Amino acid sequence: MEPQLVRGLGEQIVERLREDIFAGRIAEGERLREMELAERFSVSRGPIREALRQLSWEGIVDTDRNRGAQVSQSASDEIQELIIPLRRTIETYAIKLFYDNLTEEDFSRWERILDRMKTACLEKDFATISEMDIAFHRLWVERANSPDLLAIWSSIVARVRRHFRESHLEYEKPIHVYEEHLPLISALRKGDRDLAIECLENHIR
Amino acid sequence: MEPQLVRGLGEQIVERLREDIFAGRIAEGERLREMELAERFSVSRGPIREALRQLSWEGIVDTDRNRGAQVSQSASDEIQELIIPLRRTIETYAIKLFYDNLTEEDFSRWERILDRMKTACLEKDFATISEMDIAFHRLWVERANSPDLLAIWSSIVARVRRHFRESHLEYEKPIHVYEEHLPLISALRKGDRDLAIECLENHIR
DNA sequence: TAAATGTAGATTGTTAACAATATTCATTTA
DNA sequence: TAAATGAATATTGTTAACAATCTACATTTA
């Protein structure tokens, strides 16, 4: 069974809104009105509602009955110390699921993301750096082909998206963000699973 | 702000369908047609679609575009090996946040839950056993008073709710589910944080 | 003045009709 | 016979109208 070539409107809108929020183009706390979004995307409120529910499950927006959705506040700093072991557990688990059936297509998808990240690093475009960082790791987890794994990862990362941006701002040279992703791909290309796991543990901190 | 007294149709339908599926009244692999459910619950397809999406996110039903939903085969045990370290990380972190300001009220809330669990164990009422097991640990995490922590924990448990139930079914004597919760509370009553952490690591498996 | 009440408007919740896609099954074709 | 074709039907995807609820703000009341 092919992996669904045509996607529904709701799904497409989820991705666009998620990217807008992760990139900071829609601010934390901002209210998301169904009619407004429906006009922006030129669809009816049905697919918009569907998208907002999805984002709500991912923890990216908060919803109250009869009061709509707003972009949720990113978690407090202290939670970071919790997120690191959780991400390590999940992303290491992902390696085990995907490592022995990687294709050239997988590598080129990661490399396309890293190319865009590199450009963004050179331009100090922190919004895009974060977006690509999250996209890189999302693909990593997606590649494990386990809906449970992806769902859990999404809900964790959604809550700390601000930390992605803030941690990038702490770098002296943004290009280091890009460079720190290279060993991961290189370890996978070598087919060395244990090295990849080691790089990952090192990378998530 | 009060915790929402009136719930939408979608939410109510989620609960009824979830119960029906867990209780086996709707079998694994069975197809869930929107019109059929709409008639059964006397609502339109809107809330039904919403409920099916929610159940899909929880991993209880599978959906394919244009082909509707069916009750998913219960996931492979292997995800259990992921959930255990995640829960250990989160619930241990919770202890650190709550352990030095516990009150008698906290203990009596846990004990009320355990009482109901005990009764359910004796009656082999597995639905209630699971409900109380989840309630016990939810209170544990809630008590840490960190909305982010609770949100992350909830999204994991929602995703693997079914595993709670299935793990209970494996017990020879259901009462052991109850008994295994007692050392946790007893360690907390002693005020021994490290013992509580040890009991927890032992308990989540 | 400050709380309570009551509108008008904005916004979400629900419904039912219409459009697009998939499934079924009889028919054709090699 | 077995695969390919093509309606008819079943089912999901999307839309737009209507209903219910909330919000804001002016007005009343203590």
Image (spheres, coloured by chain):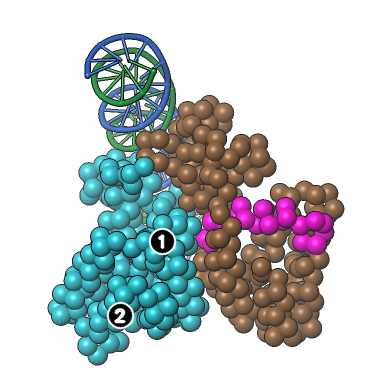
Chain colours: A cyan, B brown, C blue, D green
Q: What residue sits right under mark 1 in the picture? A: A144
Q: CA distance from mark 1 to mark 2?
A: 19 Å
Chain for mark 2?
A
x then y, percent, for residue A166: 33, 80
Say which element carries label 2. helix
Say which element carries label 1. loop
Task: Tell me, yes or no, whether dots 1 and 2 are on the same chain.
Answer: yes
Q: Quadrant of the N terminus of chain A?
A: top left
User: Is residue A181 shown above or below B142?
Assistant: below
Magenta segment, prevailing SS (helix, strand or loop): helix
B114 vs C2, left or right, is right
Q: Residue at x 61, y 36 (%)?
A: B26
Q: What residue sits right under mark 2 in the picture? A: A183
Q: Nearer the viewer, residue B76 or D21?
A: B76
x then y, percent, for residue C27: 31, 9
Give the magenta part as a residue range. B155-177
A114 vs A102, left or right, is left
B175 vs A73, left or right, is right
Q: Amino acid at mark 2?
A: Pro
Asked whether residue A60 appears in the rendered view, the answer is: no
x then y, percent, for residue B122: 85, 53
Q: Residues within 10 Å of mark 2 (few under 14, many from 20)?
A: some
The part of the image, by quadrant, that contains residue B205 is: bottom right
Chain for mark 1?
A
Q: Residue at x 43, y 36 (%)?
A: B68
Is residue B175 shown in magenta?
yes
